[in-house]
């Protein structure tokens, strides 16, 4: 049996498939290493942020004394949340899983009162607000 294994290995070493197979394995390893280095350097987009999931709670109806509000932007789980009447923006952000690490909370009135059907957008640091949420188009500097 030992002779059969040595014969198989000897045939593989002399095979015309050895060089292409070796190059293919090396190419796969190099691509894997490059992708890993780019991902660890933050050069590749995060798969979770590319496809942010929207959470919709409840059947769309609110109980007595409840409101529904929509959390968007730099929150962990954007979506529509049912909250007690009198809830504040910070309650909505908490219900949405909290703010993400890149959230610019200085641009959100966390103590502001929520209204039924309201939308709160938590901007990211350095992000311009979308036009539909009160952002503006800045004129290019004249030269």
Image: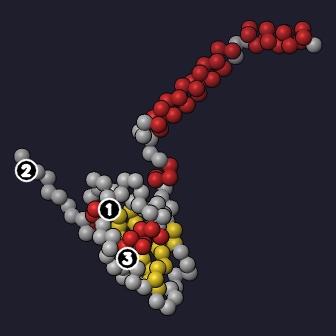
Mark 1 to mark 3 CA distance (whole Å): 14 Å
Q: Work out whether mark 1 precedes mark 3 in sequence or the reverse, and give the earlier one.
A: 3
Q: Residue 54 at x, y = what percent?
A: 49, 66
Q: Residue at x 64, y 18 (%)?
A: 22
Q: Residue 52 at x, y = what percent?
A: 48, 58
Task: In the rendered view, tell whether residue 36 sits above or below residue 103.
Answer: above
Query: Circle 3 sits on which residue?
Result: 88
Q: Secondary structure at mark 3?
A: loop
Residue 3 in the figure: left or right of residue 60:
right
Q: Quadrant of residue 139?
A: bottom left
Few, some or many residues within 10 Å of mark 2 (<14, 14–19, 20+)? few
Q: Which mark is residue 142?
A: 2
Q: Work out whether mark 2 precedes mark 1 in sequence or the reverse, and give the earlier one.
A: 1
Task: In the rendered view, tell whether residue 65 sits above or below residue 18.
Answer: below
Query: Circle 1 sits on which residue?
Result: 105
Q: Secondary structure at mark 1?
A: helix
Q: Which quadrant is the N terminus positioned in?
A: top right
Q: Residue 6 at x, y = what percent?
A: 84, 9
């Amino acid at each position: 049996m030992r002779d059969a294994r040595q014969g198989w290995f000897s045939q593989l070493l002399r095979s015309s498939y050895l060089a292409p197979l070796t190059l293919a394995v090396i190419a796969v390893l190099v691509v894997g290493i490059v992708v890993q280095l780019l991902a660890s350097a933050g050069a590749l987009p995060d798969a979770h942020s590319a496809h942010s999931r929207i959470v919709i709670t409840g059947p769309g109806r609110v109980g007595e004394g409840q409101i529904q509000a929509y959390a968007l932007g730099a929150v962990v789980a954007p979506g529509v949340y049912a909250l007690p009447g009198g809830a504040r923006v910070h309650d909505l952000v908490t219900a949405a899983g909290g703010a993400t690490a890149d959230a610019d909370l200085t641009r959100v009135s966390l103590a502001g009162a929520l209204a039924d059907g309201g939308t709160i957008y938590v901007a990211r640091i350095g992000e311009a607000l979308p036009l539909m949420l009160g952002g503006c188009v800045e004129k290019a500097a004249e030269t």
